[in-house]
Amino acid sequence: MKERSKKTYRLLIGILAISLLIACSSDDPKPVEPGDGYVATPKPLTVPPIFQRLLPPPNIPSDNPQTEEGIALGRKLFFDPILSGNGTQSCATCHKPSNSFTDNSQFSVGIDGTEGTRNSMPLFNMAWNSNKKFFWDGRATSIEIQALEPVTNPIEMHNTWELAVASLQSHASYPEMFNKAFGTKNITKELTAKAIAQFERILISANSPFDKYLQGEGSLTPQELNGFEIFMDESRGDCFHCHGNENSPLWTDNIFHNNGLDAIITDKGLGNVTGDPSQDGWFKSPSLRNLAYTAPYMHDGRFATLDEVINHYSEGLVYSSTIDPLMKAVSRGGVHLSESDKADLKAFLLSLSDSSFINNPDFQDPN
Amino acid sequence: MKKIAFLLILSIVAISCNNDDDDCCNNPPTNAAISFKFTQNWGTTAVTPSNYNTNVFENTAGNYVSISRLRYLISRIELHKADGTTVAFDEYQLVDLADANSLTLTPALSATTGDYTGISFVYGFNEEDNVSGAYPDLNDASWNWPSMLGGGYHFMQMDGSFDDENGMPQPYNFHNGTARVSDGVFEQNFIAFEFDQDFTINDDATIEIKMDISEWYKNPLTWDLNDRSVDLMMNYLAQKDINRNGKTVFSIGEITQ
């Protein structure tokens, strides 16, 4: 009996040991080898009070938490032309802080002098894009994925990631910065994109005159207030269905619409991504924040001024089969605002511009 | 050793039999996870994003209608037990046909097994719940209803196209929420549904809540989109007529478990 018990005991120990071995050899990714023992310092986003009060928490991927070192690395990378094929363009070339991280061209020009076909998007409040579709056509499903594309796009930075990573790897300071941010000196495109995404997530804009008004910290002019009424009035501006409201302070719904720009759709937008022809000509609603700095407007930068944008919705709507039903006045060409309503609406829209955002020293070129 | 093993097996069998007897004659209630599945149809035809824009339906007024967006809000779902108690779920649900995840709600609270006599819920928010800006996820979805119209949230956004009297496509925005009577005067516009229906929950269950979209246009009022298709939000009569027609829109479908 004793001998049998011993055998049983040994058998159980054996099974336990094998189980542990199996558990240890599961499909879990290999832990990152911390080089020199660096562990990055957590740096959660500072959520503005108005977002804290009205919006869900920011989206931070569990595999890319915000850290001081990651943000610093991302900021350096964002402004460094090292990622481009000939070392002349950085992310900031087309996404300048002074323009709310877009530029003032209709189409940005890549390193080979080739012009793009869409207007550079402004960058802010990206951590609150809850449907996680980035670019005008929503083709990237995270900031990390979005950040990978311009480097290899032949009409933008026109590089390969192999070459870009090699440039970073042979740089005097980047390997150590990656080590401090991610615990490894072995630079990859994925870690590069993660760092850039961390920097982009801190680009938060929520301190416009309208924000201050909502927080009881400032006032608006009668013209701006009347403009807001027009914005919220379904029979006049009816802007709020796609562009937020005082309780939805991103000032975009972050989804896609055909807003009546063309009778014949040449750029399919979302439809090109999904393959659904009923979504041809659908583009993401841009936020109305920081319009003072982001001209020209629309996905193709066709409107040089805010007046042209307002005129489009007032008199310039054009029917196409995929037009959004929210463009309800298309049969009349638009909602036909009076000239004074247009002026007031414009004044309100400009009250959403945040000068402290474009001048934030933490968002400028560190190089 | 053999005797001990035999006795052990015997006692397990005896205990098992005893449990079976209990289940048979005096079944104590146990927790049951409840899910709600939201489905939409036009009469007998299912409506999904795959037939958005392409399926053309004819409403009672003879309008040929296609749908390109449908979102609606359901809140305060309750199950009513035969013993007089109620299982009240805290969650509300913004159903968006374009978001498959929104078509199912699995509340945190469990129900208990047993006999039930009814299901109730609110289409939209009642006055207590319809507080401007109070729900971050709904704010994020730009689901708010303008303050000048009473504030709070939309109850429904149904958008699409119909052929007008000349056969030309025209947009419609069938949006519903609080009704504005006059400047600063508003009227509640939610609909409280109560379905008396006997059913028994034996296990985890999924309860289907069905919306028949065609009912918005026909019962009791025949709704002609040529008369009213857009700018309905500030139109008091339109808002109240949507409410009137809404009373036959929802029903309880299958209960599966």
Image (cartoon, rainbow, N blue to C red):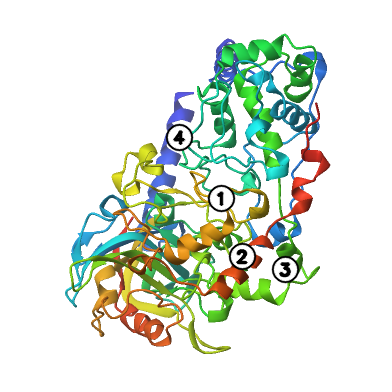
Instruction: Give A310 or A65, whichever is nearer the viewer.
Output: A310
Give the residue type that dot 3 points to.
Leu
Dot 1 and dot 4 within a common chain: no
Give the residue type that dot 1 points to.
Ala
Give the residue type that dot 2 points to.
Lys
Q: Which mark is residue B7?
A: 4
Closer to the camera: disc 2 or disc 1?
Answer: 1
Query: Residue drawn at (58%, 57%), measured in percent from left and top?
Result: A306
Quarter of image, res A39: top right
Tell me, yes or no, if residue B79 can be seen here.
yes
Query: Residue drawn at (34%, 77%), measured in percent from left and top?
Result: B195
State the SS at label 2. Answer: helix
- Give the residue pinned by disc 2: A346
Tell me, yes or no, if residue B111 can be seen here.
no
**Residue B147: percent from the left, percent from the top?**
58, 77
Q: Are marks 1 and 4 in contact (CB under 8 Å)?
A: no
